[in-house]
Amino acid sequence: ETGVTQTPRHLVMGMTNKKSLKCEQHLGHNAMYWYKQSAKKPLELMFVYNFKEQTENNSVPSRFSPECPNSSHLFLHLHTLQPEDSALYLCASSQTLGTSGEQFFGPGTRLTVL
Amino acid sequence: TQLLEQSPQFLSIQEGENLTVYCNSSSVFSSLQWYRQEPGEGPVLLVTVVTGGEVKKLKRLTFQFGDARKDSSLHITAAQPGDTGLYLCAGVNRDDKIIFGKGTRLHILP
């Protein structure tokens, strides 16, 4: 595998379900990010991790819980989501924290909450 | 709140035509990035512009950063079906935060 991979690619869940999204980067990067991409809204940065430590949480509801066990893996745990949480969730990584370096995005997980 | 407005939202043109899409803001950015996102994929960085008035070329794509670093344009010459996708601009503010526009969805008809 190369680049940034995300699983699953598609997920349908009910509001009472618990599920997790997984992201893995094979680039040796130190920073990882979760973004939400909704129709008709700009790409929204959710969480930022640098060397496994969370450095940014952009007022994301607690029903989204990130986990970063090491610099290569990032998870997003989902619990009691709402239909408005349906979106494309993108993971990205970069060599260093900050916007001066290029971010490499994964293909995303298309989430539908029923 | 800093916003980046992209126009047009949608554009459908014939292969071989030229086009320009815009990214505008009332805020100043330290740099601006352009991404292309194809269906089923994540965004891919095309270019970063840093200096006011800067022009960068990537084959048939020409990117320009406004003199005041508040706006940018992307011009495509002789568009091809492979140029189809969602074009996103993203500005980096002085707090090193990245702010994305909603994008321009471009469709090139063969």
Image (tube, grey):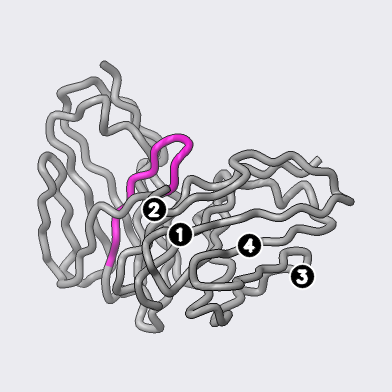
Q: Residues within 10 Å of mark 1 (few under 14, many from 20)?
A: many
Q: Which residues are magenta?
A: B32-42
Compared with B64, B87 (above or below) is above
Name the residue at 21% across, 36% down.
B19
Q: Quadrant of the C terminus of chain B?
A: top left
Given the current orientation, which residue lies at the most extreme top position? B110
Q: Residues within 10 Å of mark 4 (few under 14, many from 20)?
A: some
Name the residue at 69% across, 46% down.
A86
Q: Which residue is mark 4?
A: A75
Earlier-in-chain disc, 4 versus 3: 3
Earlier-in-chain disc, 2 versus 1: 2
Q: Residues within 10 Å of mark 2 (few under 14, many from 20)?
A: some
Locate residue A64 relative to residue B93 in the image: left or right: right
Q: Which residue is mark 2?
A: A3
From the top left corner, tell me how far across and down residue B11 is, in percent. 34, 32
Q: Do the residues bearing badges 2 and 1 touch, measured as CB atoms within 8 Å?
A: yes
Earlier-in-chain disc, 4 versus 1: 1
Locate residue B81 relative to residue B104 in the image: left or right: left
The span from disc 3 to disc 2 (Cα, nearest Å) is: 29 Å
Going by the numbered disc 1, the residue's amino acid type is: Gln
Q: Secondary structure at mark 1?
A: strand
